[in-house]
Image (tube, rainbow, N blue to C red):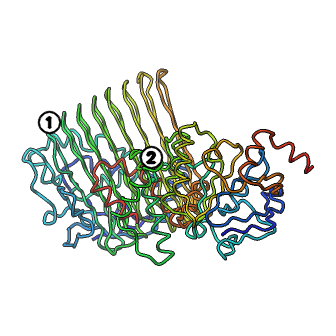
């Protein structure tokens, strides 16, 4: 156990050697990097001051914990459990098809050293994002997922992360490689059990090889008073499909970064997000899709409902490189604000260097449709249930993007 | 059933209803006709409880209750139904689910158990047949992607489901072709009983060929300036409103 404070951050975390040189490089980088301030463009509306002020404790051993609330009973999945940032072999499922790898880096290194070396940290932006560098240097053992060529994993992989002690810092690291013609669905859920003031710093690197397909569903439902930074780095090769759905249910500070490099033709990329905020919750969604090759399509739909004094940020960037012709990129961000004290900052950005593209973006932030409320009231719905019905309808548009009905119902229950 | 006395209502600074009186008894059908801007839609909105309209004077007694004291949902629970001139599209809210919620909220108001799924489905089947509303439309989002005629049929379907005591049809004939008009009128006529009443608000006489009123009122400049039997509608169709409004002016 190590205590982490802002001013002695670098000296106080213990580094786990997993034989990855990248860890040391990131460690060196950290000495020079600075934490973002409100002057840092990408963090303009999100202050990390509060998180950095706190003291944290780092765990290096998984403890036993009752996960009955976090395992989705009706979801037949390979459950991979991380407790306070540490992989638990006892709690995790180890029965999956032989050719599939789901293991910690130290364990996986024995057989897959070259594969891991070729991919690990390949797309993580350590030099740009201090929280990524922090993650790279301090993550415990991480989780490596490899779906080899032409394998369709029938069951989804559910990576459950749970903090069980207050003031914990969890650096979670996932590397997912979906090889040619393979298909997998991964659910990443973030929860806490009677734990407050934690900082979870999660980095997921995803390599989607030629003709592969992956769906990543993120469910963020830590208790209030917890802080979550989630970074997803994706590299897509030709004819691949990547889809991410992020549902933010709770957690007082949530920052999501999704960065996709579409590095092959005929790819489809889809990003959807739903944030239902209350209290003093702050949720920041930053997405960036870089179309580097022609003939690809990207879809993006982020929707939020903000109550009380909550604040929200949406920043969606679409970049189309000079030679990336025939790109279709659609982006939408819609927000409903239900309180005078709630704030939303929305910023769509298009940077297009090619001339033959179809791109659209739009953002709306408003209140309820009064016409619709009145209509429902004249039919005998109380104002409250009419509002609830409209919120549900608003959220359903995003929830419907979640393919698994079981998962969709589970998220809905968490939202209620 | 409904007694409106000296009703004055405004939107912003503009007074629209200027002392309107009307009395409707159970079993009756009343037509309220009048030129554009006479206050027809304001009357329906005030009766249904839209809060943009401010009632500055007058009273409305509905079955012994002060109607103006009730909010829109309470009016609905007490048996008032407004068929909208422009039914609202509500994406993502299923037609059937919201009706079930509506019915159950009213049952809760009267301290009754929620409706059994089987009874509800039976009712849906029966009432949708009445206005020839297809299964596809019933299950879709409220009014989304409905044609003009389908929207009006959906209004009457909702009316049938909610079994109101007093129905107000606000320009239900606008934008309807003759077949849709027949279907809508058939629905309204079938639902008519000695215990309920209907106010048909319309610009044209056309709808009254199918829904035969007991009384016809002419609304002009915020007041009822003439009341007669169904033949008054025919007279209006023939002569227009000028002979009445000019006499008034």
Residue A127, given in percent of the width and then of the height, sits at 39, 45
Residue A251 seen by the camera: yes
Please tell me how crowded label 2 is: few (under 14), some (14-19), or many (20+) other residues with Cα within 10 Å: some
Q: Is residue B97 above or below residue A206?
A: below
The residue shown at (80%, 62%) is B20
Q: Is residue A113 above or below residue A230?
A: above
Asked whether A262 or A156 is in front, the reply is A156
Q: Which mark is residue B133?
A: 2
Please tell me how crowded label 1 is: few (under 14), some (14-19), or many (20+) other residues with Cα within 10 Å: some
Pointer 1 residue: A149
The residue shown at (47%, 27%) is A358
Residue B135, given in percent of the width and then of the height, sits at 38, 47
Q: Is residue A357 left or right of residue B71?
A: left
Q: Could you tell me if the residues under marks 2 and 1 are in contact, i.e. CB atoms within 8 Å?
A: no
Residue A81, given in percent of the width and then of the height, sits at 21, 62
Could you say whether the residue bearing mark 2 is in a helix, strand or loop?
loop
Asked whether B36 or A312 is in front, the reply is B36
Q: Which quadrant does the C terminus of chain A fall into? A: bottom left
The residue shown at (16%, 47%) is A154
Chain at numbered mark 1: A
């Amino acid at each position: 156990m190590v205590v982490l404070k802002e001013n002695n951050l670098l000296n106080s975390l213990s580094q786990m050697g997993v034989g990855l040189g990248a860890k040391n490089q990131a460690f060196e980088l950290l000495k020079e990097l600075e934490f973002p301030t409100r002057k840092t463009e990408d963090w303009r509306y999100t202050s990390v001051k509060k998180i950095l002020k706190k003291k944290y404790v780092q765990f290096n051993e998984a403890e036993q914990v009752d996960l009955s609330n976090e395992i989705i009973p009706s979801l037949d999945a390979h459950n991979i459990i991380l407790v306070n940032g540490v992989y638990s072999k006892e709690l995790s499922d180890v029965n999956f098809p032989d050719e599939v790898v789901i293991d910690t880096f130290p364990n996986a290194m024995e057989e897959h050293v070259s594969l891991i070396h070729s991919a690990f940290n390949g797309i993580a932006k350590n030099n740009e994002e201090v929280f990524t560098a922090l993650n790279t240097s301090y993550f415990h053992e991480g989780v490596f997922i490899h779906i080899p060529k032409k394998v369709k994993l029938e069951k989804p992989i559910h990576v459950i992360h749970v903090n069980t002690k207050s003031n914990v810092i969890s650096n979670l690291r996932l590397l997912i490689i979906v090889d040619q013609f393979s298909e997998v669905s991964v659910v990443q859920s973030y929860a806490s059990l009677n734990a407050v003031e934690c900082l979870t710093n999660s980095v997921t690197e995803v390599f989607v090889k030629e003709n592969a397909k992956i769906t990543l569903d993120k469910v963020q439902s830590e208790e209030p008073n917890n802080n979550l930074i989630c970074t997803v780095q994706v590299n897509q090769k030709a004819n691949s499909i990547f889809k991410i759905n992020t549902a933010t249910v709770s957690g007082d500070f949530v920052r999501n970064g999704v960065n996709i490099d579409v590095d092959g033709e005929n790819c489809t990329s889809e990003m959807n997000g739903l944030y239902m905020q209350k209290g003093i919750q702050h949720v920041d969604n930053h997405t960036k899709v870089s179309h580097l090759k022609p003939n690809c399509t990207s879809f993006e739909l982020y929707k939020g409902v903000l109550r009380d004094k909550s604040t929200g940020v949406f920043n969606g960037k679409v970049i189309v490189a000079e030679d990336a012709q025939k790109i279709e990129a659609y982006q939408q961000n819609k927000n409903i604000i239900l309180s005078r004290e709630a704030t939303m900052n929305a910023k769509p950005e298009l940077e297009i260097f090619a001339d033959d593209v179809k791109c659209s973006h739009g953002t709306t932030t408003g209140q309820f449709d009064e016409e619709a409320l009145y209509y429902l009231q004249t039919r005998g719905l109380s104002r409250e249930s009419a509002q609830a019905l409209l919120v549900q309808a608003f959220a359903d548009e995003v929830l419907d993007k979640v393919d698994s009905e079981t998962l969709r119902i589970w998220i809905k229950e968490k939202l209620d | 059933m409904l007694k409106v006395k000296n009703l004055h209502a405004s939107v912003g600074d503009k007074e629209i209803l200027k002392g309107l009186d009307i009395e409707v008894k159970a079993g009756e059908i009343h037509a309220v006709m009048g030129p554009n801007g006479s206050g027809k839609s304001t009357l329906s909105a005030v009766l249904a409880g839209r809060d943009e309209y401010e009632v500055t004077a007058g009273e409305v007694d509905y079955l012994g209750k002060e109607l103006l004291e009730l909010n829109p949902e309470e009016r609905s629970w007490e048996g008032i139904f407004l068929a909208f001139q422009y039914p609202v599209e509500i994406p993502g809210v299923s037609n059937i689910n919201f009706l079930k919620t509506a019915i159950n909220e009213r049952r809760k108001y009267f301290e009754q158990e929620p409706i059994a799924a089987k009874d509800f489905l039976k009712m849906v089947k029966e009432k949708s047949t009445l206005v020839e509303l297809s299964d596809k439309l019933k299950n879709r989002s409220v009014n989304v992607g409905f044609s003009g005629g389908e929207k009006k049929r959906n209004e009457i379907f909702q009316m049938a489901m909610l079994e109101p005591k007093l129905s107000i049809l606000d320009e239900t004939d606008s934008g309807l072709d003759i077949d849709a008009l027949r279907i809508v009128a058939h629905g309204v006529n079938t639902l008519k009983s000695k215990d309920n009443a209907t106010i048909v608000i319309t610009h044209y006489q056309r709808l009254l060929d199918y829904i035969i009123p007991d009384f016809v009122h002419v609304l002009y400049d915020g007041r009822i300036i003439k009341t007669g039997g169904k033949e008054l509608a025919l007279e209006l169709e023939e002569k227009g409103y000028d002979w009445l409004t000019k006499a008034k002016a």
